[in-house]
Image: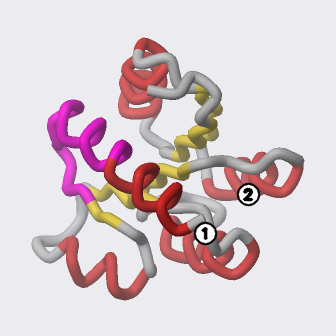
Amino acid sequence: MDPSLKILIIDDDEHVLATLYDFLSDKKYDVTSASDGLDGLKFLESNKQGFDLVITDLVMPQISGIGLISIIKKKFPDTPVIAITGWGEYPGAFAIESQADKVLSKPFELSELDKVIKELISSKKNNI
């Protein structure tokens, strides 16, 4: 994958955050992590180059993932978002509500996440 791809991960679960950070860093992505929605929003707004993709939990303190995704879709409409959640039996409903490009239910396979990232980045490049 392209090492210049910038990915922002936002999750209040330290274990999930560390696992995703290590996995994506090993894949040679340029990874930034935030432990809540407010910090994630600060990273988004302060990063001049922007992010190529955002992965966010849906249920978090400060700003929920659903709130965060709606802000991302307004301010950074070209940025694909993967929502991850351990809540609810119907992640598809969360996807519709949050406008996420993809929703993965925890626990998910890291290989599945990698596949989704590649699909979203590829379709983003095709739309430019």
Give the Cα distance between marks 2 and 1.
7 Å
Label 2 close to label 1 by CB (< 8 Å)? yes
Picture residue at 41% right of the left edge, 18% below the top: 27
Instruction: Classify residue 75 as left or right of residue 15.
Output: right
Looking at the rendering, the stretch of residues picked out in magenta corresponds to 104-118
Q: Where residue 41 is drawn, which disc sits there?
A: 2
Say what secondary structure mark 2 lies in.
helix
Residue at the disc numbered 1: 68
- Residue 124 drawn at (x, y percent): 50, 60
Q: Is residue 58 above or below residue 121?
A: below
Of 1 and 74, the residue lying toward us: 1
Q: Where residue 2 is drawn, which disc sits there?
A: none
- Residue 118 drawn at (x, y percent): 35, 43
Name which of mark 2 and mark 1 comes first in the sequence.
Answer: 2
User: Which amino acid is tagged 1?
Assistant: Leu
Of 93 and 14, the residue lying toward us: 93
